[in-house]
Image (cartoon, rainbow, N blue to C red):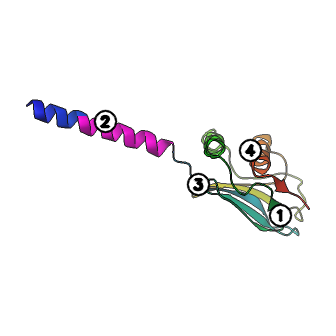
Amino acid sequence: MRQALALAAAAAALCACGASAAAATPTRIAFGLGGGTVVPFRVVIEPTGSVRANGSRSVTHRRLSRRTVLALDREVRSAFRSGLASRQCPGTNPDVGTDFVTLGRRTVVVHGSCEPRFQRLWNALAQAVGLRFG
């Protein structure tokens, strides 16, 4: 009986450790600009902290610390959970590109500047990787 209780306690402890480790594992984040008449670009932040940029923009930071990656992951998750959704902003010129942020399989796109929460999130990502315009 004691042996069964000890095994059950050990299994519960392992499950708890696995759950906390999974929660602390960041997901790939991507953001960028596409569509319109602009040259598109995409920046990818890997869970390892590696940063890649494709297209018309480059980054000054090719690697982010684990702390930074986890903070960005939390920030994107929080924004997505709080109801941040894709939007077509009224009056936006069709030549203007559409900004996007992707976490895992979920992508939010905003065409225009009518969503301040999205703009803050996008700008935080751009600042973290040192996005270069030009």
* Residue 9 location (% of width, % of height): 23, 33
User: Predominant secondary structure in magenta?
Assistant: helix
Label 3 and label 4: CA atoms lie apart by 20 Å
Query: Marks 1 and 4, how far apart in space?
Result: 18 Å
Labels 1, 4: front one:
1
* Amino acid beneath label 2: Ala
Is residue 60 placed above or below 76 in the rendered structure? below
Tell me the distance, in whole angstroms, between the alpha carbons under discs 1 and 3. 21 Å
Residue neighbourhood size for the residue with mark 4, other residues' Cα within 10 Å, grouped as few (<14), some (14–19), many (≥20): some
Q: Amino acid at mark 4?
A: Leu
Tell me which segment is drawn in magenta. Answer: 10-24
Q: Is label 2 in contact with label 1 (beta carbons under 8 Å)?
A: no
In the picture, the disc for residue 13 is 2
Residue placed under numbered mark 1 in the picture? 57
Quarter residue 33 falls in: bottom right
Q: Residues within 10 Å of mark 2 (few under 14, many from 20)?
A: few
Quarter the C terminus occupies: bottom right
Residue at label 4?
Answer: 121
Identified at 51% across, 47% down, the residue is: 25
Mark in front: 1 vs 3: 3
Mark sitting on residue 48: 3
Return the x and y of residue 98 as percentages of the image width and height: 80, 60
Of residues 66 and 125, the one drawn nearer to the viewer in this rendering: 66
**Residue type pointed to by label 3:** Thr
SS under mark 2? helix
Lower position in the chain sequence, tag 2 or tag 3: 2
Q: Amino acid at mark 1?
A: Arg
Quick one: label 2 or label 1, which is nearer the N terminus? Answer: 2
